[in-house]
Image (cartoon, helix red, strand yellow):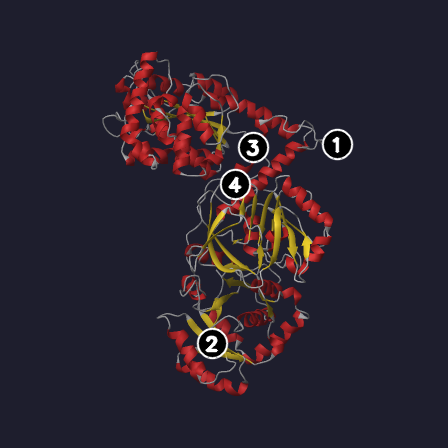
Amino acid sequence: MCNGRIMIAGTNSGCGKTTVVCGLLKCLLNRKMNIHAFKCGPDYIDTSFHKKVLKIPTGNLDSWFCKPEDLRKMVSKKADKCDIAVIEGVMGYYDGMGFTQRASAYEIADITSTPVILIINCKGMSSSLEAVLSGFVNMKQNSHIKGVIFNRLSEKLYRYAKECALKLGVQPLGYIPSDSSLHIESRHLGLVGADEIKSFDEKLEHLADVMEKTVDIDAVMKLAKTAEKLEYEAEKDVGTDSKSCVNIAIAKDEAFCFLYDDNIAFLEENGCRIMYFSPIHDSEIPHDADGVIFWGGYPERYAKELSENKSMIKSVKKVIDSGIACIAECGGFLYLHSYLEGTDGKKYPMAGIIDGEAVNGKRLQRFGYMEVTPVSDGMACRCMQPLKTHEFHYWKSCNPGSDFQVKKVSDESISMAGYNTEKLYAAFMHIYFFGNEEFGMNFIKKSCEYAAKKHWNNIAKPLNGLGDFEDIIVKIAGIQNTEHVDISKKALVIMCADNGIVEENVSQSGQDVTAIVAANMASRKSSVCLMAGYTGAQVIPVDIGIACETIPSGKKIDDMDGILHKKISHGTKNFLKEHAMTDKQCIKAIETGKEIVKMCSEKGINIIATGEMGIGNTTTSAALAAILLDEKPENVTGYGAGLTNEGLKNKTETVRKACEMYSGYKDDALKLLSCIGGLDIAGLAGVFIGGAEYGIPVVIDGLISGIAALTAEYMSPGTKKYMIASHAGKEPALKKILTHLELKPVIDANLALGEGSGAVMVFPLLDMAMSVYNESNTFENIDMEAYECLH
């Protein structure tokens, strides 16, 4: 752990916090100390000063973006090896969202148990100093304020200010004289950037020299060491290697200077290689970029220079049009417009990705925390999944977009703005990856997909020559977070369970067949086991709810090796008489599926096929499909394992009755599953959810596997991103399910064997595609000009 930490907070914005922090950092550096710095809130500019002084990346602490546990973890991890961590507050110490302390410096000090030094701007005050200090110290029972530094105060008055502090039980730590050469100038978005201040190093040296004389730095260090050790929960191991190894090009120059170091750290921690480029000075985006980011800054101040770099603008348009994953926030958003009004009032041509102009709004347009909710799925996040963001800008867009509902947290005003497509996030709202981790991972996944697609296009063959198989490998690249796709270790998970609905004569077979087939699977002699053996896939039959305890030979199912014994009950109930299973049983079955995926992950399995065995399960599946897809029973009910026409009529009527009894649970997939589903379906739903949690692609087989996938998507939205469709099947509901999931099967051969056979059949086809992906010559290898997409 670090040897100490301290927060430098202020009575209000502009009281001199950043000046004091920079001077303190320099004084500590002069003592050869190892230091880390943080800034409370979403500010970019102040952190650039910390970085300028320390010559290392710094970070932000924001209690609105992040949970308390995550804040404590961030402070502990980043400050782990330093001597002192210095945290700069935000605005006034107690100022949060609206007239609350939410996301205030005080809240962060309280969460992290950090002692606070208050900075008071004394200009124009004398005796009022005591009232101000008293108010701040006594505002809360434990204000955490332990010391005070008086800014813009003369040496003559310091002894009176010191007495006020001691009277209030606060340690006086010194003063900074009123000297304009010690303070940092500002402009419309806050302080002037650290890189723009002439003779910054000399100014910093002067400030440190003054503070060594007027501030008790040793006492500050001693106070920092009183900070208590932070405890936090260790990160959970999800069992996957999330290293992406993709190249992320980030715009960074005079125009684009608002970069969260924490966002860059997030990308690096997840394996991304960072490549910086200058939209002003470079001629193009790096050719090996797999994702591109334009964060904020002052493009309006450099509009002329940006516009004159025509080769860069051409490169930006070409790369974004090619489908690269792109984030463009605030200043980056302005740059993507067709025209940008500069600070000189002239309008300059820009990248033209967004049709329309970005112009000077003449006043502050939006400032503060925003909760944004997408109205459709996109790279940022799923439809209706809120993100936490913030805005601060004077320029406005004549075509701001409408893909997000933007709610200002302080006054709950709502507007529509921003672009959230499959590959592009463009808006004024700034995103902080910590607290919005799914957004960050979605961007990385899309970058991995782009890298894989580039690799396919570099192979010496016609573009998209392997059609849907190229798309599947690209999708797996996103799932595995790397273009170096690996599906060499395969598994087939087969959930075996019986269904009480067989009492209604919906099947020509009895429940004894489930046990017999499961026994065949245990000896690896069933059809699907032989198919799996051909592909090298490990077979995992699971007894999650087989009704019969023995097979005709008298051998007990429970005594069989080769079966994973996870029985929850001896089959389900007849759902026309009572609920098929209890909620507790259903949840346990789902958790069983997730546990099996975890087990597979720990064994290095990198792709899973799903299968099932259970008499009556096409009836339960059809009933679920009819309700979830709002379909007529006759449109989703099929012959199953060889029913007669009369049997089909009875089965369809059974599904109709299920719809009459349970349609009220349409919007509660878990409850509906427990009412009319099977343990096999619930277990497979858990496998699909587990695939999303552990980053493993899961292949859908036929109807039963498909309805499990659909139910999983309803229960855990976004799970479908980890699913691969195998075949179209004969059951009428399957095509409708796959259409709803936006998945395309690659085999259409009237397969109806079940047990996971169609899913396993995809494995060798994917292996063939992978051999082309990994081993083929590229156009460069054979000295041939690459094909280009002309449409």
CA distance separating discs 2 and 3 = 58 Å
Residue 683 figure quarter: top left
Q: Earlier in the sequence, mark 4 or mark 2?
A: 2
Mark number displayed over residue 486? 3
N-terminal label among 2 and 1: 2
Say above or below: 172 vs 759: below
Q: Which mark is residue 536?
A: none
Q: Which residue is at a point 75% across and 32% down the rendered structure image?
A: 785
Q: Which is closer to the viewer, label 4 or label 2? A: 2
399 lies above or below 199: above
Q: Residues within 10 Å of mark 1 (few under 14, many from 20)?
A: few
Q: Is residue 641 left or right of residue 33?
A: left
Q: Would you name the residue on which mark 2 appears?
A: 148
Q: Earlier in the sequence, mark 4 or mark 1?
A: 4
What residue sits right under mark 4 in the picture? 241
Q: Dot 4, how many residues are within 10 Å of its Cα: few (below 14), some (14-19), or many (20+)?
A: some
Q: Residue at the spot x=29%, y=26% of the render?
A: 658
